[in-house]
Amino acid sequence: MRVNIMDQRGPGFRVLSEDQIEMIYSAALEVLERTGGRVFHDDALDLFRQSDAVVSDGNRVRIPASMVERALKDYPRKITLGGRDGRRTLHLEKDQVNFGTGSDCPFIYDRKTGERRRYTFNDVAEAARIADFLPNFDFFMSHGLVSDVPKPKTYDRHQFLAMVTNTTKPLILTSVDGEGLRDLYQMACLIRGGEEEFRVNPLFIIYIEPSSPLHHTREAVEKLLFSADKGIPAIYTPCPSAGATAPATIAGMLVQDLAETFLGLVLSNLRKPGMPLIIGGVQTIMDMMTSTYSYGAPELSLASAASTDISKWLGLPMFSTGGCSDSKAVDEQAAVEATFSLLAAFLSGASLIHDVGYLDSGLNGSLEMLVLCNEIIGMVKRFGKGVQVDEDHLALEVIDRVGPGGQFLSDDHTMEHFRKDFWLPNIMDRSNYEGWVAGGKKTLKERCEEKVQHILQTHQPVPIDEAVMTEMKKIIERAEKKAR
Amino acid sequence: MSELLGKMSELLIAGNIGEIRKVTQEALDWGVQAKDILEKGLLPGMDIVGQRFKACEMFIPEVIRSANTMHAAMDIISPLLSESDTGGIGTVVIGTVEGDLHDIGKNLVAMMLEGAGFKVVNLGTDVKPQGFVEAAKKHSPDILGMSALLTTTMPKMSETIKALQEAGIRDRIKIMAGGAPVTQDFVEEIGGDAYGSNAAAAVEEAKAFVEK
């Protein structure tokens, strides 16, 4: 028997050495002591004033390194979420990768007319159904922004309803403000059966966005403090744009991003230690020709992979980005950019890879891209399984059984292995020329469109409980009355 | 009885060789005719296998397993079938042309033809034009199938057709050709009758000939 065998799974990808991580970490601590950040929330400023932090110039907060280091010890390395049906399917642990959509795209291409138009409640519901069906999606964000609501300030409640009724997968939500988050939380607790159940098996993660550089808005802080109070998992993530709202260097962007995240981390720790906190977010460059916040840039993938290395070193789950594109259409550019970022993000071992299915730099939530990316993720995951090397996989028995000049197609070993060891394509066309011609010479986009149609015609998610639905709608009605 | 035959179809699709032997024997013990076992149990099952393969729901190793399952049942019922029954829906002589040792694709076609109810005479690989002619004389097939994987051996297909013409039996037989480099145009150019771009397509073409 062999001893001391180490199995390698995947190529062991990382982009930062431990020394480089230390340098970036120290630099982020230096930013908090020297430059600090501005906080636009009175309760938060009071919390800082009562601590070792220094508040000057009204709302400028500087934080000693020791506060960050102490706070870091209080956060869980592992977060688990369950879907609407309670099944605990989303595991945020080191090198455990989960894929999902992005959130709040204003536009979609109408499937009938092909014209670009605003996202509706029904579009989000359809995106949710598709993500519910596709096996490589582990969580769902709204993909689109529900625009057909009576009052824009209540969009978040309607959006949540469209999402949660059409998929049983765990969710990541956005909200208008602290009030909005409170309503979403109450709606989720109705589904879960109370706050206690939500605490040990949360249904959603809340996405919170401070504003680079070094600004922490009232809304962002409201949401963070409410999440700390209730133990709602939160992503506190600035979206720095290298060259515009952050330094043009990737290391500089990572330093600033980390300093922004750490301010939130210290603040939530002052309020109530130990909330489930996730770092990361979209980290990319501003395109210097068009000023576009690029979702297809290789720098996005590099910065996100570096950030993931840092997150693992810190012991905090990472919210990374992939499967998105600057292209305006489901075309070659979209496929290239999505494949590149999905592979890089997957190999980096990020906990959550979001924005899968974005077109037009995050402005267009395409349903066809969801189908295409599901396929790409399948390929990427197969690659990540690595090469299994053991007695059965070395296959000496079968090599001998088949012998010189034989064939393996009809051997039991092939039968046993091909379905589990081969990735089986669904959208990718491997037919020969005649088969392709006979099938109508369909393009990748056409095949994706057909798949979208097929899913929407055939897949119905598990229905939500009627009584819970009624109660959730009451919360929305209350919000509608209150909103101006 | 129909329940047993239905079960045979299912076992065939699942490729359960051990179980099909038992159930085939059981059916015979119940007094089911061998001909009915073939036509109402096995062939409908293989028909579904062909359909599923075409719909990308079954894959090559599974199709082969089903074909082998059919063979296991055939071993039991063959001695009980009359001469006319074993002839199936038609006879195919098949082989890889001279100079070419590739036979996986050709064997797959042979297996699927058998599954569809054809009697198949498999000549193997490296078959000289004269080898095809002799086999055609001996077995009087409805269809003759040629395979080539190498572009360098493709001209042998044309030579084989010429040899059949010279022997005066070309017009009695439908000639099919296939293999990775072979195309519809090529088959027409050399004077063949049909081309199958994959095993399932080849079976469809063959069926079309005998149903005419």
Image (cartoon, coloured by chain):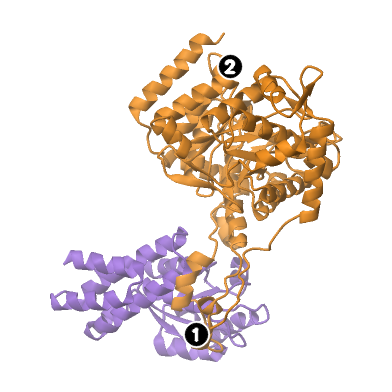
Chain colours: A orange, B purple
Q: Where is residue B153 in the image (x, y as percent from the top left)?
A: 64, 82
- Mark nearer the N terminus (1 vs 2): 2
- Residue A393 appears in the picture as rendered: yes
Dot 1: element: helix
Dot 1 alpha-carbon crowd within 10 angstroms: few under 14, some 14 to 19, many 20 or more? few
Dot 2: element: helix
Q: Which of B119 and B199 is in front in this view?
A: B199
Seen as rendered, the residue at the extreme left is: B30
Contact between labelled residues 2 and 1, with CB atoms less than 8 Å apart: no
Q: Position of residue B23 (x, y in %)?
A: 22, 74
Indicate the quadrant where residue B157 lies: bottom right
Q: Nearer the viewer, residue A19 or A143?
A: A19
Residue tagged 1: A397
Q: As drawn, is B34 to the left or to the right of A88?
A: left
Task: Tell me the quarter of the image containing the C terminus of chain A.
Answer: top right
Residue tagged 2: A152
On whether disc 1 and disc 2 are found on a single subunit, the reply is yes
**Residue sitting at x 42%, y 20%:** A473
Q: As drawn, is A36 to the left or to the right of B181?
A: right
Chain ID, mark 1: A
Vertical relation: B73 (above or below) A70:
below
What's the distance in space between the residues labelled 1 and 2, CA to CA? Answer: 67 Å
Dot 2 alpha-carbon crowd within 10 angstroms: few under 14, some 14 to 19, many 20 or more? some
Q: Position of residue A20 (x, y in %)?
A: 80, 52
Q: Nearer the viewer, residue A130 or A7?
A: A7
Q: As drawn, is A105 to the left or to the right of A150?
A: right
Q: Which of A377 and B88 is in front in this view?
A: A377
Vertical relation: A150 (above or below) A426:
above
Q: Position of residue A404 (x, y in %)?
A: 56, 89
**Residue sitting at x 29%, y 78%:** B73
* Amino acid identity at mark 1: Glu
Chain ID, mark 2: A
